[in-house]
Image: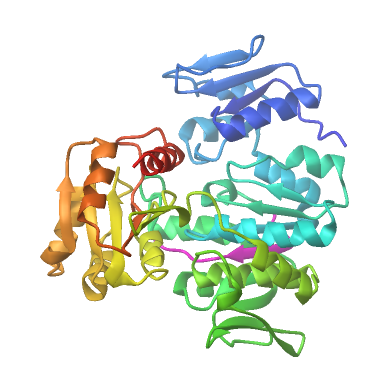
Amino acid sequence: MNLNLESPVAILGFGTEGQDALRFLQGQGIKDITVCDQKTDLKVPDGVKTRLGKGSFEDLSDFRTIIRSPGVRLSDPQVQEAIDSGSFVTSMTKLTLDVAGDRVTAITGTNGKTTTVALAGQILAAHYGGKFIMGGNGKKPVLQEALDHPTWPILIEASSFQFHDAKKSPYIAAVTNITPDHQNWHVSMEEYIEAKKNILRHQAKSDWAILNANNENSAKLSSATPAQLFWVGQRRGPNWVVWEEGHLLLTFDGKTEMVIHKDQLNYKTHPENTLFAVVIAQLHFVPVSTMIEQMKLFRGVEQRLQFVRTFRDVHFYNDSSATTPEAAEMAIGQFDPKKLILLMGGSSKNADFSFLAQQIVEKGVRVYLYGQEGKRIQEAILGAGGQRQILAYDQSNDFKKIIESAFKLAKPEDSISLSPACASFDMFKNSKERGYQFGQIVNQL
């Protein structure tokens, strides 16, 4: 199938998704392509035209088709001028929904979506015997595979950026939770919720919306969709899944089953992530036996409460992807808080640390702070009366020293978790580099 995208084409932003867009367009036989990016130090393939640096988004009306990367706002005045002039503005996510929305399962949310996708993906891959597509949100692109395999089910992880201007919704849409995040990108919390709402807004009555009954913002989205509802975390409506006394209970189509006990799981994650994965598996009619088998085999996701090693009776966990206070709160719930040290700090996302600080103080968690946001976290903890919880605020920007110093303050059987609650750009290229360096340093202790 050819999407008949008219030339000339502009790609706005040349990150992971922009690079995928270039490969896709070239595969479609389109040659008149220009990469537009405000950065100037990009490696663009030979023969591809570029507009780089300041002014790269000017005169976009020169292009018939514009592929918008997730980080580029649809509301950008230069993008709006191009739309007004007749340019067709789209994205890789929108194109995927255009050609395959009726077989897409999409998962979004502030926290938990990556682990949920990984576990659900492992279960679905086993169920479909490999005839299954998985990707999205910085992972493997799915658009070309969707065209190449027109009957295969598709599972994608989606950010609010990707669905910000969507006009179609997937057959199955899950919203794990909505808490303040990306406030350095979205104009307001209300706009952030509206962006998440777009994953549900255009569903049909025969579609499915999976919502978190324990998260107010997720639960409120039930009014935004005509789809059938499947509730996570509480016994609500005819279809629900919960943890009760360590047992995972699933009710669907009038039948309740006990799926698994938490002691049978060999990974650390927020309990709700497992619930969402089970619902997705159920809506794909995966046998419970397959769910159980794959949940027992699952070992978690890299840099999400990933066990690194035990050294001198101290256990190290890499949770570098915990870039919000809420993600750090979830980490606290996976350990004995009295035996937990959190490494916290990084660059700002304009987050509110007050509730996290209260949790740290109430539960007796110790923290070792660093980076630009270390000071704000320290102030929040002190404001909650937690002076004794702060082991140090290290302003050295020496990650090796920070880790070694935290280790020296640990007691036997403590767990040290890199759960920063912040972005990484003050000291690292991204959170993956932060997590990689953490693992390297810990393994060299």
Within the image, what quadrant is residue 313 found in? Answer: bottom left
Q: Is residue 173 magenta?
A: yes
> Is residue 54 visible to us here?
yes
Residue 108 position within the rendered picture, expressed as x and y whole percent measured from the top left: 57, 58
Q: Is residue 417 above or below residue 185?
A: below
> Is residue 68 visible to us here?
no
Q: Is residue 429 above or below residue 52?
A: below
Residue 331 position within the rendered picture, expressed as x and y whole percent measured from the top left: 40, 63
Q: Which residues are magenta?
A: 168-179
Q: How many marks?
A: 0
Within the image, what quadrant is residue 362 found in? Answer: bottom left
Q: Main secondary structure of the magenta part?
A: loop
Q: Is residue 147 above or below residue 117?
A: above
Q: Is residue 320 left or right of residue 142?
A: left
Query: Which residue reaches farthest top?
Result: 47
Q: Residue at x 52, y 75 (%)?
A: 219
* Quarter of the image where the C terminus is located: top left
Q: Is residue 219 left or right of residue 201?
A: left
Q: Residue at x 66, y 77 (%)?
A: 229
Viewer-proximal residue, 413 or 380? 413
* Quarter of the image where the N terminus is located: top right
Q: Residue at x 36, y 67 (%)?
A: 332
Residue 39 position within the rendered picture, expressed as x and y whole percent measured from the top left: 44, 22
Q: Is residue 169 left or right of residue 163?
A: right
